[in-house]
Image: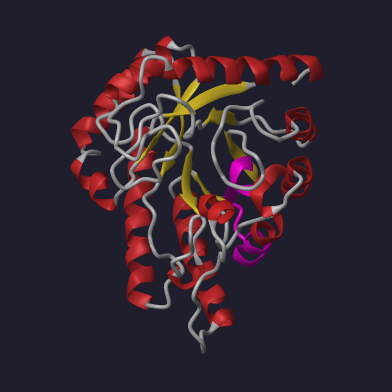
Amino acid sequence: MKIGACVWPFKWSPPYEETITRLAKANFDAVELMAWEESVLGDYYTAEEIKNLKSIIAGHGLELNLFYLPYGEAASADASERQRYVEMAKRGIDIGVELGAPIINSTAHLPFGLPYPRINDRVSSQIFTVDVPSGLDWKGNWEQYTDVIRECAEYAGQAGVMYTLEPHPFRYGANADGLLRILETVDSPHLGINFDPSHLFPMGEMLHVAIYRLGDRIRNCHFSDNDGETNRHFRPGKGKMDWKSVLQALKDTGFSGVISLELEDVPGVSRGPNSDPGPFAERHPREKALPSFEEEYFLGRAYLQDIADEIGF
């Protein structure tokens, strides 16, 4: 079982060289890079910087398992916005390929780009809802969205990499059924799933059942725990998830990819100025995670490894 880590809980924004070294010293097997904003694709991931990052990753014996694209309005009702997303995604795929990432990932998208509330506010809201204008063409929006995802997946396939979607509350692909519908409609061997249980669990999924249903379309995992009411990202073992069943299901379905710990809501975490601050960032940005932050990762990794050893995964 390969266990990696995402750079952004350690350092929200680039540069990431120091963070990669930090992860290597913490004995992770792999690292994930990302661009939170479209401007970062050109401003940070230059040809010179890509060469530098590849050298640092290789020099530490790490694997770059995934490159995360900026969010964009792939399901907008505006054709120009959808096209802008496609062009951005293609630039991001090209950068990911140059970096050596076998997987290019995007969070699934909101229908029509509607401004849904954060699921973390659900437990404290008297009324939790979203305003939906009348007269929207839902069938048309679905077809437009899956056309966008198909174009991105095919472009990734031509470049020799996999394009994955990550489920997220209230979006197309918010649960296993939504993901399976996207996979069936897009019908591309180059489209896979980045399995994130902290996004699926509050949507009512039994996680091991979702794994069995998605099967070999799962290409990467983001692991964190939560209470099933929010999508807070605690370390495995601190929430309500049944991790033994999760790992058993991954073993049974032949998963051989990287499990990346993504602990966004633990003490000492890094947070950007425009991110959901979570309970441990005191609603102020923190440029990089505190030195004590690694301890949460060590505990989470050890917890998962003990279960993996028990079931022979």
Asked if 32 appears above or below 147 in the picture, the reply is: above
Magenta stretch in the rendered image: 181-200
Q: Is the N terminus in the top left, top right, bottom left or bottom right quadrant?
A: top right
Q: Is residue 198 magenta?
A: yes
The structure residue drawn at horizontal position 22% and vertical position 38%, both measured from the top left corner, is 44
Q: Whole-percent x and y of residue 47?
A: 21, 36
Q: Nearer the viewer, residue 199 or 210?
A: 199
Question: Relative to 73, is 258 on the left or the right?
Answer: right
| Residue 190 seen in the current view | no
Q: Whole-percent x and y of residue 16?
A: 29, 28
Q: Is residue 21 magenta?
A: no
Asked if 82 appears above or below 66 in the picture, the reply is: below
| Residue 115 seen in the current view | yes
The structure residue drawn at horizontal position 79% and vertical position 15%, both measured from the top left corner, is 310
Asked if 90 appears above or below 60 in the picture, the reply is: below
Count how many numbered circles sit on residues in the image. 0
Q: Quadrant of residue 53?
A: top left
The structure residue drawn at horizontal position 45% and vertical position 12%, both measured from the top left corner, is 26
Q: Whole-percent x and y of residue 67?
A: 42, 39
The structure residue drawn at horizontal position 36% and vertical position 31%, both measured from the top left corner, is 270
Asked if 78 appears above or below 245 in the picture, the reply is: below
Q: Quadrant of residue 280?
A: top left
Q: Quadrant of residue 11?
A: top left
